[in-house]
Amino acid sequence: MSPVIRDATVADVAFLIEIEQQSFSNPNWDVHTFEKYACIVAEIDGRVAGFVVSRETAAALGGAPAEREILNLAVAPEFRRSGIATALLNHELTREAIHFLEVRESNIAAQALYRKCGFVEVGRRPEYYELPAESAIVMRVRKC
Ligand SMILES: CC(C)(COP(=O)(O)OP(=O)(O)OC[C@H]1O[C@@H](n2cnc3c(N)ncnc32)[C@H](O)[C@@H]1OP(=O)(O)O)[C@@H](O)C(=O)NCCC(=O)NCCS
């Protein structure tokens, strides 16, 4: 399955919220959160199948590259294991920046995805998540 990757529009937000609710134990992103950050969507046959959201956390300065954080990533259940998250991440990682993210310790699927895209563990944040309370693994990558 080869998705169309494009910037999200206001018309996508209802679909993004639906995927968010299908994907997380504690879905807490609303319209305003999605509109606040850079969001890329993957489309299959005209349907929004997944998204990745990121923000710049440090600008490029004095030869040091910019830094970005991946804030949210999800694929609708019916489209999973078809390379959609990989396509989204590959697109996100074309931005000239070092990328960071946090992932739940129990989220083995996402960790496998991130490792496949070149992310490595650089630290842990104890009790970072709620509902359920859980530590985060911090990962980073320079290029996919
Ligand atoms: C994690 C998630 C985004 C993966 O999306 P996806 O489109 O299915 O991922 P891909 O098809 O690109 O998979 C790429 C690789 O990730 C790994 N992977 C993906 N899903 C996996 C699973 N359920 N179990 C183990 N490994 C998995 C595999 O290595 C896979 O490569 P392979 O299919 O060749 O074995 C999706 O399962 C999801 O939306 N989960 C709920 C939300 C979530 O956890 N988001 C991440 C928050 S940090």
Image (tube, rainbow, N blue to C red):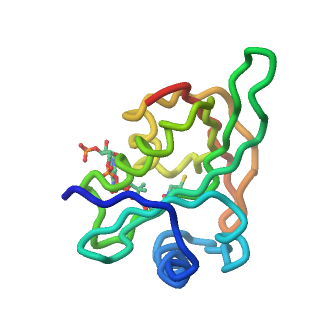
Quarter in which the C terminus is drawn: top left
Q: Which residue lies furthest to the left in this view?
A: 1
Figure check: 57 above or below 24: above
Q: Looking at this view, is 132 or 87 the one in front?
A: 87
Q: Extreme top residue here?
A: 63
Tally of numbered discs: 0
On the image, the x and y values in percent for residue 42 come to 38, 62
- Please give the name of the residue rendered at 50% of the width and 61% of the height, measured from the top-left corner: 7
Against 63, residue 110 (above or below) is below
x, y percent for residue 123: 68, 30
Camera-side residue of 89 and 60: 60
Q: In which quarter of the image is residue 84?
A: bottom left
Q: Residue at x 62, y 31 (%)?
A: 97
Q: Residue at 73% x, 15% y: name it.
A: 63
Residue 79: % across, % down? 28, 67
In the image, what residue occupies the spot 27% across and 69% down?
Answer: 44
Residue 124 shown left or right of residue 20 in the figure: right
Horizontal side of 71 relative to 20 (left or right) equals right
Q: Where is residue 73 in the image (x, y as percent from the top left)?
A: 51, 57
Camera-nearest residue between 92 and 122: 92
The quadrant of the image that shows the N terminus is bottom left
Residue 124 vertical placement versus 1 (above, below): above
Quarter of image, res 25? bottom right
